[in-house]
Amino acid sequence: MIVLANRAEIIVMTSVNLAIVGLGRGFMLTLPALRDNPAVRLRAAFSLRTEPREHFAKQFDAIACDSFESLLALDEIDAVYIATPHEIHAEQTIAAVRAGKHVLVEKPMAIGLKDCMAMEAAAQEAGKIIIVGPSHGFDAPIQKAAELVASGEFGAFRMITTFNFTDFMYRPRRPEELDTSRGGGVVYSQAAHQIDLVRRIAGLPVSSIRATAANWDPKRPSEGAYSALMTFEGGAWATMTYSGYAHYDVDELVGWISELGFDKDPQAYGAARRRLANMSPEDEIAAKVSRTYGPGSESDSPPRAPHHEHFGYLLVSCDKADLKVTPTEITVYGNSERQVIDIPPPRLPRVEVIDEFVGAITGEITPVHNGRWGVDTMACCEALLESSRTGEEISPGAIINNLSF
């Protein structure tokens, strides 16, 4: 048994023997939170690349598995963190829960709603937990905003305005990351974040989505931008816009804090496009690999972000106030006065994700971002794409119901 101090509570928790599937960028960004949680024991890893898995085994006195099947056969493993390409999430998650393992699976949950529903059904049948993340719906400022809205202190929730302008489309990419059919583009990779945080704050079922998504650069052949109007049961709504075309940088509006919580140099404008312009396809893949886990990577001594992660500009409107949410604070613009609610700096990034995963496994908490949550978020992503294709308003719930028969 382990005594875990979490948010001023002392909780007695059993340890979780965790295996990692995929030692890429997602794992590296989440690793500090995994190492920080005393309830997590990193016991095994599988990667197609030999060098990272051997480095993992040496670093954590763990088992380097040369196949996914051999990892699942380890009786000592309680749970797996699946951080592989989007198109294999479903197959690996279903195999893992059927092997008796709980699963933390990176967003997007899968690349199709039918696969997400199969993952959730398999977990229910096996009696295992699925948590979908990390996503920005876990971020501490988002959770605080959700708490304030749910309290009713500022009256009824009415509207969310959020937008994000980044260089997503010009970062080094593998081919499948620019192929919508394989889970590429900004809808599966980025709308999943935006939809999660909006749903988390609203706390209401989604009624419909009307959206337009487009590709503006044939050399980067997937959706790189979208705008969507999401309505909730009861009449509230959210507007969501995203562009990954590396022109305007939304970090300007949040104090030049990057998405990962680091201070950002405004003079670095245009760096992503400049770097990519000088890369061959082979160079681009090599650059992608260089940012992943392995010997000599920053994972051995990662820099600590001074601020919370974020996903762009975010304004929440209630009857009695508007709430502007940033990586450091929530500013409440009330009827007659303005107040600032400070958000304490993060202990480490993504600790909320690991806390929720461990707490769900040990039964200490009822998770928010479970398998059903992932299904509903994917239904919204598919509704966004379908609305863009047809020009019609689409109900995510109707998509789910049609697949249920």
Image (cartoon, rainbow, N blue to C red):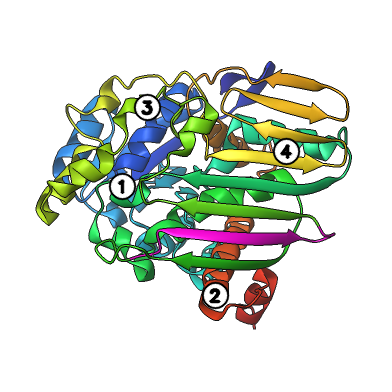
x 73%, y 34%: residue: 323
Residue under circle 3?
Answer: 266
Query: Label 1 to label 2, Cα distance in Å?
Result: 31 Å
Callout 3: 10 Å neighbours few (<14), some, many (20+)? few
In space, the residues marked 3 and 4 are separated at their CA atoms by 31 Å
Label 3 or label 4, whichever comes before in sequence order: 4
Residue, x 75% and y 59% (percent of image)? 205
Nearest the viewer among 129 and 150 is: 150
Residue 217 sits in quarter: bottom left
* C-alpha distance separating marks 4 and 2: 28 Å
**Above or below for 253 versus 38:** below
Q: CA distance from mark 3 to mark 2?
A: 37 Å
User: Disc 4 residue type?
Assistant: Ala
- Look at the image and give the residue range highlighted in magenta: 222-235
The residue singled out by tag 1 in the image is 22
Please name the residue that numbered disc 2 is placed on.
386
Q: Residue at x 20, y 42 (%)?
A: 274
Q: Mark 4 or 2 closer to N-term?
A: 4
Judge depth for marks 4 and 1 and give the one in front.
Answer: 4
Frontmost of labels 1 and 2 is 2
